[in-house]
Image (tube, helix red, strand yellow):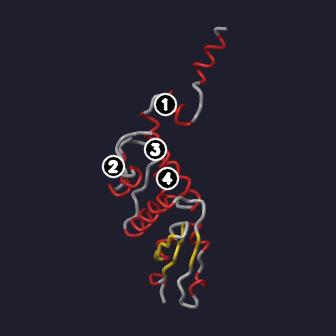
Amino acid sequence: MSDNDFKVNLTIKGKKYLIKYDVLKISSVLSNMINDSLFEDNNIPLVPIFNIEEHIFEHIIMFLEQYFNEPMNDIPKPMKSTNILSIVQPFYASIVFNNRTELNNDNLVFLIDLLKAANFLGIKPLVELCSYKIAVLLTVLPKDKICEIFGYQNTEASNESTTNS
């Protein structure tokens, strides 16, 4: 049996996802968790995934399956454009937009959760994509909005009030 025939059951909070082993190898963590010896008796291994929300994991699976079939274009560093569609294929842009076009806290929370999960699972291209999109979003926000999103007080306003006292 070739690697192409192997499938793995991943479970999140009781929900099972049957995914090709070759697709999962894109994740360094899943690749290390699932080794060839799990397939010796021709059973489909069951691998529980913790610390990732189901809706985030579904985006990760979509990303992995697409990446396996059509790898994402490399994201140049430093960032040369804020237009994500000029950098990566439309599918990958849609993953980080989460079917939303407006900029709000929910979008940023989604992106940060997706980034943390991708980092946790060792999916470098998805980490880079999320980081790029977050950087783009932060470049268009005013400073006070960024402080609000991350729960920081505007330090300039605080410094001015203490200096004038």
Cα gap from disc 4 to disc 3, whole angstroms: 20 Å
Q: Are marks 1 and 3 in contact (CB under 8 Å)?
A: no
Cα gap from disc 4 to disc 1, whole angstroms: 24 Å
Residue flagged by tag 4: what amino acid is it? Answer: Glu
Cα gap from disc 1 to disc 3, whole angstroms: 14 Å
Q: Is residue 99 left or right of residue 115?
A: left
Report the residue at 51% width, 27% height from top: 144
Classify mark 3: helix, strand or loop. Answer: helix
Q: Is residue 157 left or right of residue 89?
A: right
Residue flagged by tag 1: what amino acid is it? Answer: Lys
Find disc 1 in the rendering and name its residue. 145
Residue flagged by tag 2: what amino acid is it? Answer: Leu
Q: Are marks 3 and 2 in contact (CB under 8 Å)?
A: no
Q: Are marks 1 and 2 in contact (CB under 8 Å)?
A: no
- Give the crowd class for mark 3: few <14, some 14-19, many >=20 residues within 10 Å: few
- Give the crowd class for mark 1: few <14, some 14-19, many >=20 residues within 10 Å: some
Classify mark 4: helix, strand or loop. Answer: helix
Classify mark 2: helix, strand or loop. Answer: helix
Find disc 4 in the rendering and name its residue. 128
Find disc 3 in the rendering and name its residue. 106
Find disc 2 in the rendering and name its residue. 85
Q: Earlier in the sequence, mark 3 or mark 2?
A: 2
Q: Check the image and name the residue furthest to the top.
A: 165
> Is 10 in front, or is 94?
10
Q: Earlier in the sequence, mark 1 or mark 2?
A: 2
Which quarter of the figure has residue 83?
A: top left
Query: Is 111 placed above or below 60 here?
Result: above
Classify mark 1: helix, strand or loop. Answer: helix
Q: Earlier in the sequence, mark 1 or mark 3?
A: 3
Indicate the position of residue 81 as horizontal and vertical percent values. 38, 42
Report the residue at 58% width, 82% height from top: 36
Locate the C terminus by quadrant.
Answer: top right
